[in-house]
Amino acid sequence: MAIESGRHMLDSADVAEPTQKLVAREKSIQRRQRGGNQAQTILPTTHDLSVVVPTRNERDNIWPLAESLHTALRGLRVEIIFVDDSDDDTPEVIEDAAKAMSSSLFHIQLEHRLAGDARAGGLATAVVHGMNRAQAEYVAVIDADLQHPPEQLRVFYDRAMTQNVDLVVASRYMKGGSYQGLAGVGRRCISVGLKWTARFLFPEHLLRISDPLGGFFLLRRSLLADVSLRPIGYKILLELLIRCPWRQVLEVPYHFRARTHGESKANMQQGILALLHMLRLWREVPVAGRIWKISLLLLLNMLIILALFNVSKSFYTHAHKLPYTRDRSLRLRKHSAESLPDVEHAIPDF
Ligand SMILES: Nc1nc2c(ncn2[C@@H]2O[C@H](COP(=O)(O)OP(=O)(O)OP(=O)(O)O)[C@@H](O)[C@H]2O)c(=O)[nH]1
Ligand SMILES: [Mg+2]
């Protein structure tokens, strides 16, 4: 008994210690975040560009990414907003980079979401959260794993400014771009298949966009005003393209690189979520897939008209056959000597 109770106590302590450590770690991240946010009030609130980076266990990618962004966006007033759902020490690495690199022009912020409800929706809600925090006129979204070349962001920003466009979309599928970094033939087939499904379902919005499901883009922040975003899965750009009232989109080619550090979080489930996401958009946005909705309505109308025509035709046939049959049998009885072919000949042809 004593041994059992002793063991039980030992087990509880074993479980309690990591839990306490985790809570303490989360609290310390939150404390430092609060400190960071207070510091933010003395920094200029006007930025040229906000960059949202969703992260989940990307510890080895943070420094190379932050350094590349720092170099590429030199001279601009930039805020980098990491929205982090990690269980490893990624948030600590982000804080170290923020301390070392932040200046009046380059400001790194960390939004670490605690495990549990705060992370519901994963990547989709992380990006929306980051975009809601952004302050600059233009907001860019880029993956942390360096598959999206950070140096391209400067090209996006410059072209958005000079050409005054609402959205700049990085494309793997146009001339000058490539998707070699997608791991395996299966992933490539799924990516291409989903892309065509989206373009087929929403032709008015997407027919001229070669890569509507990528995660690398830049948009004018005012597009988000009065739009309620409800993305599921990984396809945030699709959500923006369908729900936001954009006018001009510019596509810029890029080479989607292979991941060198950390693990991919994409899986088959993301493919299914992408299809569910398309269905939701089709249902919720009246103008999405308008051509198919109108075609379906026309088809339905034609079916109804055809059905009504058939009903009235059979009703008419029925109504005219009954007296004739009675008449015919009467005549048959009355003139039994008359030849049948003559009587048959008198039958109207329906
Ligand atoms: N905040 C947050 N970020 C996430 C989550 N899942 C993935 N990410 C980040 O979103 C970005 C894209 O995720 P990846 O796992 O690289 O997915 P992918 O690029 O579609 O797939 P690969 O080509 O296999 O890398 C990375 O920066 C991830 O760290 C999540 O649940 N929360
Ligand atoms: Mg990736």
Image: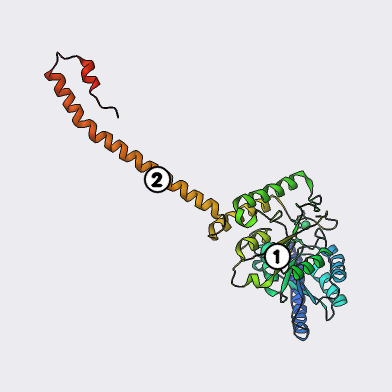
Q: Is residue 160 left or right of residue 222?
A: right
Q: CA distance from mark 2 to mark 1?
A: 43 Å
Mark number, residue 304: 2
Disc 1 residue type (three-letter): Leu
- Closer-to-camera residue (134/287): 287
Q: Which residue is mark 1?
A: 167
The residue positioned 68% from the left and 51% from the top of the image is 195
Quadrant of the image where one finds ligand 2: bottom right
Q: Is residue 292 left or right of residue 321?
A: right
The quadrant where residue 53 appears: bottom right
- Closer-to-camera residue (79/302): 302
The residue positioned 19% from the left and 14% from the top of the image is 339
Residue 178 to residue 20: above or below: above
Mark number, residue 106: none
Position of residue 1 measured from the top left corner of the image (x, y, whole percent): 70, 62
Position of residue 277 measured from the top left corner of the image (x, y, whole percent): 61, 56
The residue positioned 85% from the left and 76% from the top of the image is 75
Disc 2 residue type (three-letter): Ile
The quadrant where residue 333 appears: top left
Label 2 SS:
helix
Query: How many other residues sit within 10 Å of disc 2, few (<14), some (14-19) or many (≥20)?
Result: few
Q: Quadrant of the C terminus?
A: top left
Position of residue 27 measured from the top left corner of the image (x, y, whole percent): 74, 76
Residue 242 to residue 25: above or below: above
Q: Earlier in the sequence, mark 2 or mark 1?
A: 1
Query: How many other residues sit within 10 Å of disc 1, few (<14), some (14-19) or many (≥20)?
Result: many
Residue 82: in sight, yes or no? no
- Closer-to-camera residue (103/19): 103
Circles 2 and 1 in contact, beta carbons < 8 Å: no
Residue 110 to residue 231: above or below: below
